[in-house]
Image (tube, rainbow, N blue to C red):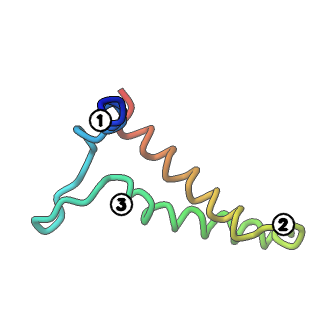
């Protein structure tokens, strides 16, 4: 039981200073706002894939689009919150 409690404490250490934004009096986590903002570049990249013809040969389009969205979100988080 003590080991599980110590493990839980170690895993929750990173949650004490999560970046957030105050919008209308409510605090939103930064990853949520960056994920919403990452939709636009993802759609632009997909449009470029369609224009070039790459979209036709993609086997798992939803996985590729979600991965691109995640890539943009994590890159923005790293750029804005890295020390």
Query: Dot 3 surroundings within 10 Å: few (below 14), some, or many (20 or more)?
Result: some
User: In this picture, is 21 found above or below 36?
Assistant: above
Label 3 vs 2, first from the N-terminus: 3
Camera-side residue of 68 and 48: 68
Numbered circle sitting on residue 19: none
SS for callout 2? loop
Label 2 vs 1, first from the N-terminus: 1
Query: Dot 2 surroundings within 10 Å: few (below 14), some, or many (20 or more)?
Result: few
Q: Which residue is mark 3?
A: 33
Q: Residue furthest top?
A: 83
Measuring from the top left, give residue 35's x and y in whole percent: 45, 60
Query: Dot 1 surroundings within 10 Å: few (below 14), some, or many (20 or more)?
Result: few
SS for callout 1? helix
- 79 left or right of 28 in image: right
Measuring from the top left, give residue 36's x and y in whole percent: 43, 66
Measuring from the top left, give residue 39's x and y in whole percent: 51, 67
Spatial CA distance of label 3 from label 2 is 28 Å
Numbered circle sitting on residue 58: 2
Q: Which residue is mark 1?
A: 5
Spatial CA distance of label 1 from label 3 is 32 Å
Measuring from the top left, give residue 25's x and y in whole percent: 10, 65
The quadrant holding residue 33 is bottom left
Camera-side residue of 74 and 79: 74
Q: Nearer the viewer, mark 2 or mark 1?
A: 1
Label 1 vs 3, first from the N-terminus: 1
Spatial CA distance of label 2 from label 1 is 45 Å
């Amino acid at each position: 039981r003590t080991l599980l409690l110590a493990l839980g404490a170690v895993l929750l250490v990173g949650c004490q200073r999560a970046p957030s934004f105050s919008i209308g009096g409510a605090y939103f986590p930064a990853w949520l706002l960056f994920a919403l903002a990452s939709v636009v570049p993802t759609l632009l990249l997909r449009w470029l894939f369609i224009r070039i013809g790459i979209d036709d040969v993609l086997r798992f389009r939803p996985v590729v689009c979600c991965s691109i969205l995640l890539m943009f979100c994590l890159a923005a988080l790293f750029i804005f919150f890295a020390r």
